Image (tube, helix red, strand yellow):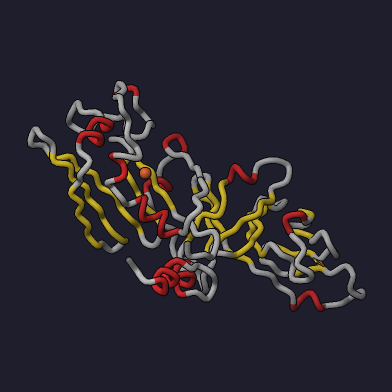
Amino acid sequence: MISEALNRRITRVGSGEPAGEVLRRYWHPAALIDELEGERPVVAVKLLGEALVLFRDEQNELALIGRHCPHRGADLCYGRLENNGLRCPFHGWHFNRDGQCVEQPGEPEGSRTHEKIKTASYPVVEKNGIVFAYMGPGEPPEFPNFDCFRAPESHSFAFKGLWQCNWLQAMEIGIDPAHASFLHRFLQDEDPSDGYGKQFRDKSENTELPMTQLLREYPRPEIRVEETDYGMKLTALRHLDNGMTHVRVTNQIFPGAICIPMSREMTITQWHVPIDDHSC
Ligand code: FES
Ligand SMILES: [Fe+2]
């Protein structure tokens, strides 16, 4: 059991927190492209404890800026999407894609006060249906070259879910090979040839053994962990009664991504994105 102080140190993700500063050196998924569909491509985003707003402007460019107007804190998600930026619904200050205030309609003609007003803004890129943001200092690192980003659209899809826990709890489960024998247990086996895209419905490589049966009958994997340049490689070995060993490899890519096999042909790359800055 780790101490409360260490738990806090590795799970608090706000700006200025030690883990928050490390995580800010990496790209994180901010939203699905699908969320920007429709007449008004403006969505609220919470990432690393920061309230942000993501929008697509008239030039088809994406922007991610602070959600609360630096004037009186009005919510820019309700702003007017115009002139390649967002105009605050309260007093009409206009912010461009860089978060720079470019207009303050209530100020005297010719006023240049707006030049000193800037809200947060972060670089974003679109990859295979996901908008990623970089919230750290300086130039963003190179974008990770995972299989799922190289795969054509016909062979990949993006989805997201909300887990009410901290990012480390989510990742611990992602790399835990033992729970699959219970949480993902099926009491009956289906025809594996009908299992494409279904979790654990395929058969194990080079055997006729459905994964569902294998997980059910061998709940005690031998787990080996290797540190690698990119994070960790976890190998779960299930020693079968016929002398064969079933091998399942999960890669953990620092800081928060995992790549897990779902069948002989399919993997899931799962990114544990910290939303709120809390430790439990
Ligand atoms: S609160 Fe946004 S312009 Fe006043
Ligand atoms: Fe699971």
Q: Residue at x 52, y 73 (%)?
A: 137
- Residue 203 vertical position relative to residue 254 in the rendered view, above or below: above
In the image, taking residue 24 as reference, residue 50 lies left or right, namely: right
Q: Residue furthest left?
A: 243
- Residue 70 vertical position relative to residue 147 in the rendered view, above or below: below
In the image, taking residue 147 as reference, residue 26 lies left or right, namely: right
Q: Residue at x 69, y 67 (%)?
A: 99
Point out the image quarter for the N terminus. bottom left
Q: Residue at x 39, y 62 (%)?
A: 255
Q: Residue at x 57, y 63 (%)?
A: 123
Q: Tell me if residue 193 can be seen.
A: no
* Quadrant where ligand 1 appears: bottom right
Residue 167 found in image quarter: bottom left
- Residue 193 vertical position relative to residue 268 in the rendered view, above or below: above
Residue 143 found in image quarter: bottom left
Q: How many marks?
A: 0
